[in-house]
Image (spheres, rainbow, N blue to C red):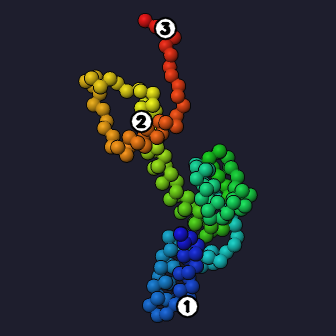
Amino acid sequence: MESIIEKLKKIQTLAERGCNGEMENAKFLLDKLLKQYNLTLEDLSSEIRKERVFKNCNAAVFIMCSYKIFGVKRTKTSYNYKNKPKDLCIELTDLEYIEISEFYNFHKRNFDKEFQKMKVDFQCSYQLKHELYTEKNDSDDKGKSYSQEELEKLLTYASMMEDVAFHKAIEK
């Protein structure tokens, strides 16, 4: 995957050295992207790092993204927590900030979506594992039917759960 920084620099090169229409199109696209990210041409070559705060950040996802973009060594030495436990701070150039923001936001949305699906599957698996469903003849129970694939997935999750049983303290 090409980073935003690489893309902007390639477009800048085309805008400076391209041929005829290619040069004009590159200039137009570069201006558009610079405005979109609130940057200037000087920012493309700037190495000045400023402290950036990612508020209410999922640290696990952010760190995975940072490892991918900046490598493990830099990631381990460059971030800390600010004020609140979920506010993560890191020193970045303008371009690095744009790159990690876009990458993190994409993966955070995807992670949250997948996590929500897994929570529902986990709940169903737990229900299956511990037989926490109503009797089939209960008129209020409409029941959900599962495809073979869904059932296999739920049973796989259930098989990974601990075997525990509830024992009544008082018998009738």
- Calculate the distance from the C-alpha at mark 3 to the C-alpha at mark 1: 85 Å
Location of residue 132 with respect to 2 vertically, above or below: above
Q: Residues within 10 Å of mark 3 (few under 14, many from 20)?
A: few
Which residue has dot 2 on it? Answer: 124
The residue lying at 68 percent from left, 49 percent from top is 82
Residue shown at 69% from the left, 72% from the top? 47
Tag 3: amino acid: Ile
Quarter occupied by residue 141: top left
Q: Which mark is residue 17?
A: 1
> Horizontally, is 135 left or right of 121 in the view?
left
| Residue 37 percent across, percent down from the top left | 53, 69
Residue tagged 3: 170
Looking at the rendered structure, the secondary structure element under dot 2 is helix
The mark nearer the N terminus, 3 or 1, is 1
Instruction: Give the residue furthest to the top.
Output: 172
The kind of residue on which mark 1 rests is Arg
- Which residue lies most toward the bottom here? 20
Question: In the image shown, does 128 or 119 lie closer to the viewer?
Answer: 128
Residue drawn at (49%, 93%), measured in percent from left and top? Answer: 19
Cα distance in 3D space between marks 1 and 2: 59 Å
* Badge 2: residue crowd in 10 Å (few <14, some 14–19, many ≥20): some
